[in-house]
Image: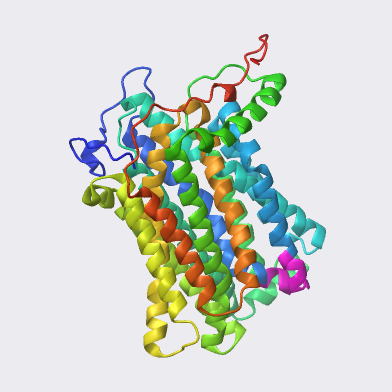
Amino acid sequence: MSGRTATPQPGDDASIPSAPAPEGRGLDPLTARRRFITVSFLFWLPIGMSIATGVLLFTDRGLGLAAIAGFFAVHSLTAAAMELPTGGLSDVIGRRTVLATAGLLNCTAFTLFGLAGAAWAITLGMALMGCARALSSGPAEAWYVDTVHAHAGPDADLRTGLARGGSAMSAALALGTLLGGGLPWLLGLGPGVGEWLTDATGGLVIPLSVPALLGAVVEIVFVLYVLSALPEPPRPPATLRGVVGGVPAAIAAGLRLGARDALIRRVLLTASAAGAALAAVELLTPGRAAALMGTAESGALLFASLACAGFLCSALGSQLAPAAARLTRSSERAVLAGGGVVALGLTLLGITTGSTSPYATAAAVTGYGLVYLGLGVAGPNTNDLLHRRVDSSGRATALSVQSLALQLVAAGAGLAAGALPLGPLPWLLAAGVVLAVALLWVRRAAAGPQVPLPSARPVPAGSTPER
């Protein structure tokens, strides 16, 4: 994402040395990359498993669609409210502690989903999952960048690791969606297996709840891996006073990021455009799938297949991100190209609404894949630019600001798309927003020093917070 050139080219395995790190310099970049990929995969696999069966599980527990919509609103609002505070917390007390906490919260949430049928328990689980989502939005990536910079310096290649981390996330979501949808179906194939499971547990565990419970087990593996495989340098002792004083300062510093740096403003606007694109796709595609198939049930199956294919396209886009930067000769132009692909995909989805002909359907499916492919290409390049402009003291905070921009715009765009009449207009408006933001990257950003966020650091025990 930085647009800098080096020999060998970024994205080649040779550009990251695999030799053991010198004493005191921590993990070598290749080892850090492998561990970052593993953490990304383990965190998102259980979430993918919950996509296919979540609504069906809650419905089978006797809950109506209005209640289920409320559960998801609790998740979104909790994630948005906690995004900046938890990003600052990671910069204060460390990446590993915050990531492990996110895993424990998700483990509790999936256990509640799998075993509980009461509305209050599911609401609590959604709130815990939203908090975990906020906690996880920056620490793993910040740990990876910090580790690579500590070993190889600030000019080290980041695109390859970030791209493969994004690919691991998408692959985990795709695999998880297939597992989550397939496990209940497989349990129903055996003679009486599903009924036996329900009877043996007194109705506590049903086939649809198995993916959630398996997800809780995966979360335990995730926590153990994080605690054992992500070493961090010693930090100043974090007292309660230091945490309470440091986190609000980190939040304030994060909110000032976009105001004082043009490149960071572009990054935040790009995240916002991605939120608008995802909101349109996630809100409008299920209805189109149901209309195409004729029933809600078969439409849901088609949408699950499309979602899996979308995640795979996103994984492919992430893998292509370093090559896109090399071909376009800068990360800025790679982000521009990715945004153009997203806008093209949304346009295809827009102009094919109202038609179920084979050609229109093929064009719509192609457009759906292009949206995720373009987001996959743009993401690692955008984040590489961000990491080269923000220093370690506020790296997780900056990622949280980026995630918050995406979530808030996605929420607003979803409401707007829902209020507009069905047809091409919502799709084309989203395409216009994405294209307008992508064009901001036509002019290459001027190089600048890293933006320090010293107020995000913890206050050592016995000292007085800076004012």
Question: Is 462 above or below relative to 30?
Answer: above
| Residue 422 coordinates in the image, percent (x, y) | 58, 79
Q: Position of residue 39 (x, y in %)?
A: 47, 44
User: Residue 458: image x %, image y %?
Assistant: 61, 21
- Residue 62 included in the magenta stretch of the image: yes
Residue depicted at 40% across the width and 72% down the height? 367
- Name the residue nearer the viewer: 169 or 371: 371
State how the image is colored.
rainbow
Say if the magenta span includes residue 74: no
Q: Quadrant of residue 252?
A: top right
Q: Is residue 97 visible?
A: no
Front position in the image: 296 or 190? 296
Q: Is residue 424 left or right of residue 388?
A: right
- What residue is shown at x 40% (from left), y 85% (from top)? 360
Number of numbered discs visible in the structure rendering: 0
Magenta stretch bounds: 56-69
**Dominant SS type (magenta):** helix
> Which residue is outermost to the left?
7
Q: Quadrant of the C terminus?
A: top right
Q: Residue 21 lies in what quarter of the image?
A: top left
Let me know if residue 412 appears in the view.
Answer: yes
Q: Is residue 283 left or right of residue 58?
A: left
Q: Find residue 340 and report its horizontal and vertical position in percent.
A: 36, 61
Q: Nearer the viewer, residue 454 or 241?
A: 454
Judged from this view, the residue extending furthest toward the top is: 462
Residue 388 relative to residue 91: left or right: left
Depicted 466 relative to depicted 150: above or below? above
Q: Which quadrant: the N terminus?
A: top left
